[in-house]
Amino acid sequence: MKINQKLRPTCITRNSGILAILFAAICGLTVVPVWAQTATTDSAPKATSQEKGNTDRAKRQAAEKKTVDEFHHYLRVGRDAKGRAVNLETSVTRFIGKNADGATVTVDLIGAVHIGEQNYFDQLNTIFLNYESMLYELVAPEGTRIPNGGRESTDSMNPVAALQLGMKAVLGLEFQLDHIDYMKSNFVHADMSPEEFSQSMVDNEESIMKFFLNAVGQSMAMQSSSSTTDAELMMAMFSSNREVQLRKVFAEQMQNMEASMAIFKGKKGSTIIDHRNAKAMSILKREIDSGKTKLAVFYGAGHLPDMQRRLIEDFGMSRGGQYWLTAWKLISE
């Protein structure tokens, strides 16, 4: 998730109470979107409250597993023959359909992590040249373009920006908004305005305070079963190769966020994922209706399982090919 030019994403370890909030910023992941929930029928005998609870829990777990499995199609830890983590990777996944005139239309979902290596952003800038319409995320006034270089001197006044600066230094990475060329003529703003975002949060009974309190409670519940221990984090912090070791810790956790992002669900889905995705898809439809046939959507990887569902169900598309880009190297040169 990105909010205007002054809010850029970061992430911290799973053991922190605000992990889920910051992880949403880097990948925008939610676990149980509205579309994944299974409705019950009225034809069966009424279940007891305990039976209903067990059934609902099983459905919820199945929905969570489906969403997590789909998330792994868009972000993964690449491993060598011995199973060692070597890269954090995001995918470019093609979907194929037809427009109203019967012409073939391709839409590539390009997953992003918003903090990455310089070479990662350089590759993306080259890839983006291949499309007639390049839809991008940014919670900002409609049509906003980010000037090259992105950062403003006032960024350091923002607490989120301060965290991002810290993560950039700790992990030895770069910020997306500083290196992606948003001034290209094919770039199309495809996200909510700040006013739309705020109103959606209100209508959906969401708030940052609720997210934070849910994250704290969830973190406490997960603490005993966390696969990343405090000892591992401390070892990485004091390693002679600290940047790479910390990247490994964070990358493994980013791939294992099964339940953490459920905290962002409001009354009707999630503003951060579901409602912003709906806005992006409406703009995609507009671009297709205008005659564009080669398009792409560049959003945080956590948005893409829901976008996949929308392309298949709402646009009648099917999945085509896929390839992977290295966002972070997890081994020393």
Image (cartoon, rainbow, N blue to C red):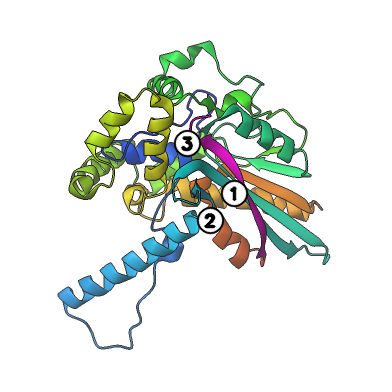
CA separation in Å, label 2 and label 3: 19 Å
Q: Label 1, secondary structure: give it.
A: strand
Type of the residue with mark 3: Leu
Q: Is residue 79 magenta?
A: no
Are the residues flagged by discs 2 and 1 in contact, CB closer than 8 Å?
A: yes
Q: Is residue 37 left or right of residue 149?
A: left
Whether 320 is drawn above or below 162: the answer is below
- Density class for disc 1 (Cα within 10 Å; few <14, some 14-19, many ≥20) is many
CA separation in Å, label 3 and label 1: 17 Å
Are the residues flagged by discs 2 and 3 in contact, CB closer than 8 Å?
A: no
Pick the front one: 100 or 199: 100
Give how far across and how far down residue 200 sits, in percent. 44, 44
Kindly identify which residue carries mark 1: 91
Give how far across and how far down residue 289 sits, in percent. 76, 55
Q: Which mark is residue 73?
A: 2
Kindly identify which residue carries mark 3: 330
Pick the front one: 265 or 122: 122
